[in-house]
Amino acid sequence: MAHFLKEPGDAEVAGVFQDGDGWVTPVTWLELRGQMGRTAMGEEIVAIYRAASAGTVDITYTVAEAAFEIRRGATSRVPIADSLIAGAARVHGMRLLHRDAHFAAIPTRLLKQKMLPLK
């Protein structure tokens, strides 16, 4: 959303997609669809981001186990959806780019991450 709304950090998000490193989870696609609504424009925007992404990282049992470990090791509550996104990044050795305080509660020993500037 930072990229779409041209919020602080949007250039960094654009760079990730331009470098071909913009992998996305099904949970993230669901969140994007929810933000975009069910309008024709929303579907078009989702299609643009799907085409720009490097692909979709599946949520597997291994990802769920990593999500569990992340939730257990976080300094505060991490919602299930966010823990699955983080678990996918961890399993695949990816760095998570975000602006979500829930992710910030995950120690860097459990997840490579970078928080975008706040709005």
Image: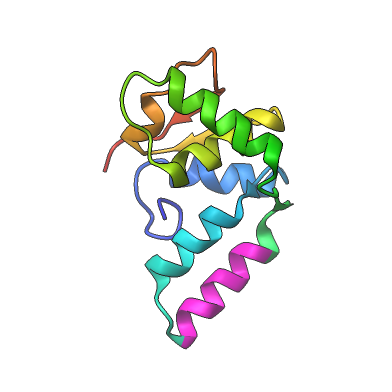
- Tell me if I can see residue 86 in this picture: yes
Q: Give left or right: position of 107 versus 118.
A: right
Reply above or below: 46 against 27.
below
Reply above or below: 71 against 38.
above
Task: Decide whether residue 45 is among the magenta residues.
Answer: yes
Name the residue furthest left: 119
Quadrant in which residue 44 is drawn: bottom right
Q: Residue at x 67, y 59 (%)?
A: 52
Q: Residue at x 47, y 69 (%)?
A: 33
Q: How many marks?
A: 0
The location of residue 103, given as percent across then percent down, is: 41, 32
Q: Give left or right: position of 115 versus 66.
A: left
Quadrant location of the C terminus?
top left
The location of residue 67, given as percent across then percent down, is: 55, 33
Task: Decide whether residue 116 is among the magenta residues.
Answer: no
Q: Main secondary structure of the magenta part?
A: helix
Quadrant location of the N terminus?
bottom left
Q: Nearer the viewer, residue 69 or 48?
A: 69
The location of residue 108, given as percent across then percent down, is: 50, 16
Q: Residue at x 50, y 25 (%)?
A: 70
The location of residue 36, given as percent across then percent down, is: 41, 71
Reply above or below: 61 against 68.
below
Instruction: Give the image's coloring scheme.
Output: rainbow
- Tell me if I can see residue 95 in this picture: no
Reply above or below: 15 against 39.
above
Q: Residue at x 67, y 55 (%)?
A: 53
Q: Nearer the viewer, residue 37 or 88?
A: 88
Q: Which residues are magenta?
A: 40-50
